[in-house]
Image (spheres, rainbow, N blue to C red):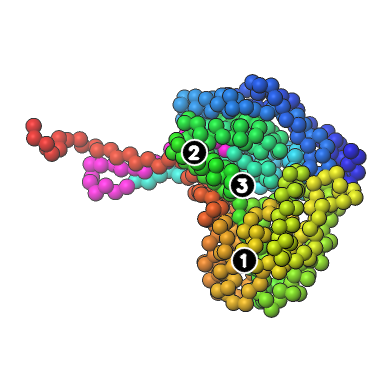
Amino acid sequence: MSGTYLGEKSVDAARATAPGIPDGAETLFIGGQWVAPQAGKTNAVHCPADGSFVGLVAEAGEVDTIAAIQAAKAAHDAGLWSSVPEPERGDLLLAVARRVRERKNEFARAESLDTGKRLVESEIDMDDVAACFTYFGKLAGQQAGRVVDAGRPDVVSRIVHEPIGVCGLITPWNYPLLQSAWKVAPALAAGNTIILKPAELTPHTAILLMQVLDEVGLPPGVANLVLGKGSVVGAPLASHPDVDMISFTGGLTTGKTIAVQAADTVKKVALELGGKNPNVIFADADFDAAVDNALNAAFVHSGQVCSAGARLIVEESIAQPFVNELVRRAQNIRLGGPFDASVDAGPLISADHRDKVTAYVEAGLAEGARLRCGGRWGTGELADGYYYLPTVLDNVHSGMSVLTEEAFGPVVTVETFTTEDEAITLANDTIYGLAGAVWSQDAGRSQRVAARLRHGTIWINDFHPYLPQAEWGGMKQSGTGRELGPTGMAEYQEIKHVYQNLRPAVTGWFPR
């Protein structure tokens, strides 16, 4: 394939500028060693922008995952990492952050080759990855526990935080390294050992991260990497009795399966399962800012964002001009490959995913939704990639599949309301509860609505920003637990009560 629409550099040329990208079967990292899968299988990774070959990586089987679990358990039982003082663990994470910054260009190109996302977006992701490791590197050692007043002068009672143990970390394909960092950084800061299982479509930056962890001196077996299909490689992480915690980011159906698999061993489970996120626009909102952010909310990374503002809920009095302007600007979004600086958005991750988005839109149209723009694949020079045009659907109402199911693509639906209570009812009418936004210049109204929305993150007059120091996670079927912030680290810790009697004595409770 020519790759001419990818800009000045084709995929092949871009890959050549990222020499650290490993290629070959020995891309599993188990017990401190790079190894090939025992069955010898490999997986070819292709760029979704035009199908060009990116690299060949290992495809692990269940036996490889069990080997990684055993390595992680042995390292944990030996105290190779948990016995390291917390400030020193933090220093290692800070070293990881520095290495990511130093290799930012290489990491970003590898991410864009795997995902097809614009290079500038991947560069921002790498900054966020470094910020995540920096935050948890500084947080390590700051949670000293607390002393509990037992009401007796001869008793010392303490609450301490300890690592959970062996943690299985399963991450998605839309933000491969960033989502890995959200899990790896707090898990290591807390003193755990880990097995990382990235999405099979986007493995390369996870491999690069393992290279960095090895380079900065993480003890063997503390961090392990297995690559492959979730049904083969991820399932043992959820069910194996030697895994103490499973953290998963991905789809609702898979998340439910993991929860069931984990239940037999009653391991801790943390799930982030996506959302159907409302973006509520009141008539007094800053019109231009609200339209611009509605585009960002829906179409950044071609809508492949768990917190995408896929449900636009607009006050009826401004709905027509608002949606007309949204449609006009959506039609001007330029699609193309990751290394073309002139484009605004990239492809979907795969042909299968593009088919799912297509079926989602077709189902909505069959139910009576009106297509305002988009609704089809990219053609011409985009035909070799998995492109889907930015799509706006209006005339939607409660009960339609496009309002209940997650598109995870460049599709936004439009609903209208007339009262504040109606807006809140619509915004909460979903099984999900990950994120949402309120746009209004009335501060009191904004706070009232934010307080009543059942979503884990609420933006007021903004959409999409997150902070490493602020918790992230969902309500309802968007998942359990939290990532980021102090709570994100606490997810990877056990809380223990240590009660010490300084003057032990006979109780006299039972007769001698």
SS label for mark 2: helix
CB atoms of marks 3 and 1 within 8 Å: no
Which of pointers 3 and 2 lies earlier in the amino acid sequence?
3
> Residue 136 is drawn in which quadrant?
top right
Task: Report if residue 223 lies within the magenta region.
Answer: no
Is 282 in front, or is 147? 282
Q: CA distance from mark 2 to mark 1?
A: 34 Å
Q: Position of residue 479 (x, y in %)?
A: 54, 50
- Tag 2: residue type? Ala
User: Along the polypeptide, which appears first: circle 2 or circle 1?
Assistant: 2
| Three-letter code, disc 1 | Ser
Please say if the residues under marks 3 and 2 sit with CB atoms less than 8 Å apart. no
Residue picked out by circle 3: 251
Which residue of the protein is positioned furthest toward the bottom in this rendering? 317
At x 65% / y 62%, what residue is drawn? Answer: 400
Q: Secondary structure at mark 1?
A: loop
Query: Is 152 colored magenta in this rendering?
Result: yes
Q: Nearer the viewer, residue 200 or 184?
A: 200
Q: Position of residue 484 (x, y in %)?
A: 56, 48
Instruction: Tell me the quadrant of the picture where the N terminus can be found.
Output: top right
Rendered image quadrant of residue 496: top left
In the rendered structure, the answer to whether residue 55 lies left or right of residue 236 reads: right
Query: CB under 8 Å between callouts 2 and 1?
Result: no
Q: Is residue 194 visible?
A: no
Q: Residues within 10 Å of mark 1 (few under 14, many from 20)?
A: few
Identify the amino acid type marked 3: Gly
Which residue carries the number 1 mark?
398
Magenta residues, as a range?
A: 148-169
Give the residue pinned by disc 2: 262
